[in-house]
Image: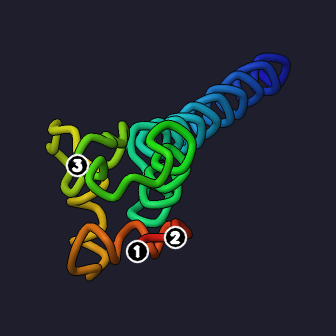
């Protein structure tokens, strides 16, 4: 009986170790998957400002046309949000102030 105890104990230890590794891997995979799906308000603002400067030549009237993919206000939010809405979420009141916050010179 003594000869069978060692292999049975090893199988149990290996099974527990594999289970722990699977649980840890599932935890990290769930966290990183969520992180890639959405971006923060600051990241969205930075991306929107870069797009406004590069593609729209800092035209403040085009702020509503700059759409930032990946910005979600809630867990189930699937709507694309324009830079104008992101500026409003940051507390920037109007289009000219939003363009100025992006580093654009607006007269």
* Image quarter of the N terminus: top right
**Which is more N-terminal, label 2 or label 3?**
3
> How far apart, in angstroms, are the residues tagged by discs 3 and 2?
18 Å
Residue toward you, 22 or 5: 22
Question: Are circles 3 and 2 on residues that touch, CB within 8 Å?
Answer: no
* Image quarter of the C terminus: bottom left
Q: Which residue is mark 3?
A: 64
Q: Residues within 10 Å of mark 1 (few under 14, many from 20)?
A: few
Q: Residue at x 22, y 38 (%)?
A: 80
Coordinates of residue 13 in the picture (x, y in percent): 70, 34
How does the figure colour the protein chain or chains? rainbow
Name the front one of labels 3 and 2. 2
Coordinates of residue 47 in the picture (x, y in percent): 50, 50
Q: Residues within 10 Å of mark 3 (few under 14, many from 20)?
A: some
Q: Residue at x 20, y 49 (%)?
A: 75
**Which is more N-terminal, label 3 or label 1?**
3
Q: Which residue is mark 2?
A: 105
Q: Is residue 68 above or below residue 43?
A: above
Q: Residues within 10 Å of mark 2 (few under 14, many from 20)?
A: few
Q: Taking 7 as reference, is 29 left or right?
A: left
Q: Is residue 59 above or below residue 103?
A: above
Name the front one of labels 2 and 1. 1
Single out the residue that lies furthest toward the front. Answer: 107
Residue toward you, 6 or 24: 24
Question: Are circles 2 and 1 on residues that touch, CB within 8 Å?
Answer: yes
Q: Which residue is mark 1?
A: 107
Image quadrant in which you'd find residue 96: bottom left
Coordinates of residue 99 in the picture (x, y in percent): 40, 66
> How far apart, in angstroms, are the residues tagged by discs 2 and 1?
7 Å
Q: Is residue 99 above or below residue 34?
A: below
């Amino acid at each position: 009986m003594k000869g069978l105890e060692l292999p049975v104990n090893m199988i149990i230890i290996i099974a527990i170790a594999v289970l722990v590794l699977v649980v840890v891997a599932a935890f990290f995979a769930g966290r990183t998957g969520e992180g890639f799906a959405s971006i923060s308000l600051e990241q969205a603002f930075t991306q929107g400002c870069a797009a406004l400067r590069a593609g729209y030549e800092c035209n403040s009237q085009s702020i509503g046309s700059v759409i930032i993919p990946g910005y979600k206000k809630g867990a189930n939010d699937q709507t694309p949000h324009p830079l104008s809405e992101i500026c409003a979420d940051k507390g920037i009141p109007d289009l000219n102030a939003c363009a100025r916050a992006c580093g654009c010179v607006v007269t």
